[in-house]
Amino acid sequence: MIKSPINIVVQINKVGFTMHLLLCNDDGYKAKGIQVLANYLSSLGHKITVVAPNGERSAQSHAMTFYQPVCVTQVSENIYAVDGSPADCAAIALSHILKTDPPDFVVSGINHGLNVGIDVNYSGTVGAATEAALMGFRAIAVSADTDSLQPDSLESLFTQASHIVEQVISNSSSMDWPNLEILNINVPQKAKNIAFAECGGESLYVPHIEELIPSQKKNTKIYLIGGLARFEPQDMSQDVSLITTNHVTLSFVRTKQSSSGRNKNLEKIIGSIKL
């Protein structure tokens, strides 16, 4: 793990180095996070196209809308609202809206809430970035810890996260960006350091399933799935733990589910399976 001060200064756009950036999210195109990100990156000379859901689509993971019409409304010159999932947004943007003008990078976020540990499996923010990576584009998912923050503090946090994203993009040519992987960035409320971290098997939130007011219908119950309480940090190599100690975390995450290398273990039962 390598750490560096959060107030690191990187020279950007001094020679007119700008990019076309596609922005997606799962909070909707009107969300504060994506608006601050778009305004910040645009102010530095980057060309911005926003293709995001027309409303809240959190926890959609990599869901796609198959065999159903998906309505896309052009809100303004470079903003499109999609009546679909975050992954739909990335897919439609890259295959149609920006087909003749593809982006240099896809950035999904800034998400209102962290996406670390096993929670990335549920994240629509990560889902949009994943779809972009599977389509051959370099993609970043960025999230910030927005719990209990007031509007002024939200603006400051999202601006800081935008600054970090821009620095990563501007320095991306100096590193080997892995194929079929996304960069997952998480920003705490009081960031003091930056670290690369493992995005592993821990969870930030204590899982919770609550039974609500019983339904009057026979054989029917109502449940609410979620989690608000947080685990105490354990393994300091994990993003889940580092984020709670005021570290901005950067983690490459695989996009492709594939065999784990344990296929040989199946040899023991193959012979006993009859057709």
Image (cartoon, helix red, strand yellow):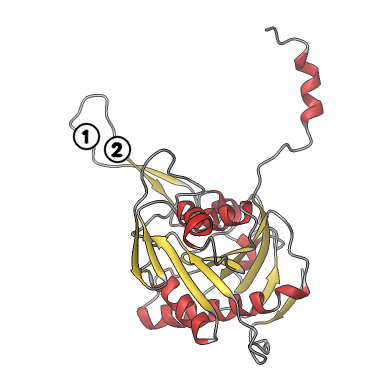
For label 2, count other residues whose C-alpha is less than 10 Å away and answer few (under 14), some (14-19) or many (20+): few
Q: Residue at x 54, y 76 (%)?
A: 161
Is residue 269 shown above or below 228?
above
Task: Give the image quarter of residue 192.
Answer: bottom right
Q: Which mark is residue 215?
A: 1
Q: Position of residue 160 (x, y in %)?
A: 53, 81
Q: State whether residue 205 appears in this view.
A: no
Task: Give the image quarter of residue 76.
Answer: bottom left
Residue 200 versus residue 53: which sits nearer the camera? 53
| Quarter of the image where the N terminus is located | bottom right
Mark 2–mark 1 CB contact (< 8 Å): yes
Is residue 212 shown above or below 139?
above
Which residue type does callout 2 highlight?
Answer: Ile
Q: Which mark is residue 222?
A: 2
Residue 72 falls left or right of residue 270 = left
Disc 2, SS: loop
Q: Position of residue 168 (x, y in %)?
A: 66, 75
For label 1, count other residues whose C-alpha is less than 10 Å away and answer few (under 14), some (14-19) or many (20+): few
Q: Residue at x 39, y 54 (%)?
A: 57
